[in-house]
Image: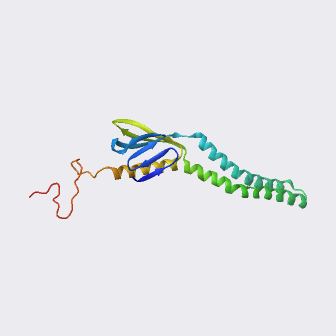
Amino acid sequence: MITYYDDRSVQVTSAAIRVDGRAFPLAEIGLVWHRRGDRSWRVLAGRGAIGAALAGPLVAAVGGIAVAVRLHRSPTVTIAIVGASVLVGLAVGPVADFLFDRLDRSWDRGSRQRELWVRWQGRPVLLLSTGDALRFGRIYRAVQRAMENAAPPRRPGGSPARATGPGTPGPDSRR
């Protein structure tokens, strides 16, 4: 038996697909398809918040420099305000790596719900619904590989092809 994918709730093997304890033998699955749900505004708002968190200190630094120049104070006060503004701008540096990592993981997970459907014993069955695009892609590809390797090759007429080799007459050969 070949294992194509295995995690805590989904296992795809050369014999069956198991999801949350339910087993679906590959021989009983006729069709596999997927659907994308609506876009999650919560995820998009989170990405916007990360962008604002990255841009906020930089905007504050530029604003501080602009204010320092417009105040027309003594050079000491102007330099102090510009220095404080630059420090605020530099504060984004240590936080930026963390925020970019969160933004990158957000893109990997995706902003839509994804569903994996199969036709099992003649009826459509929802196998999996997840918002994690990366995990969904891995599972879907594993199911595709399992189905491709489980199905016997088909001839153009729709019947299973027979194996042929040297010295073995093919299915359509005449003697």
Q: Nearer the viewer, residue 131 or 44?
A: 131
**Residue 114 screen position, x and y as percent:** 49, 42
Seen from this angle, which residue lies furthest bottom? 166
Asked if one can make out residue 65 in the rendered structure from this viewpoint, the answer is no
Q: Residue at x 56, y 40 (%)?
A: 40
- For this view, does 171 lie left or right of residue 4? left
Q: Is residue 134 left or right of residue 16?
A: right
Classify 59 as above or below 165: above
**Residue at the top extreme?**
123
Q: Nearer the viewer, residue 93 or 76?
A: 93
Going 23% across and 57% down the picture, which residue do you hit?
163
Determine the residue located farthest toward the front in the rendered image. Answer: 1
Colouring used for the render: rainbow
Seen in the image, is 56 located left or right of residue 168? Answer: right
For the C terminus, the image quarter is bottom left
The answer to whether residue 66 is above or below residue 114 is below
Residue 18 percent across, percent down from the top left: 44, 43
- How many numbered callouts? 0
Q: Looking at the image, which is closer to me, 46 or 89?
A: 46
Task: Give the residue at x 83% y 55%.
Answer: 68
Instruction: Tell me where residue 57 appears, x and y as whole percent.
Output: 74, 52
* x, y percent for residue 165: 21, 62
Question: Can residue 9 be seen from the camera position used here?
Answer: yes
- Picture layout, residue 41 above or below residue 67: above
Q: Residue at x 23, y 51 (%)?
A: 156
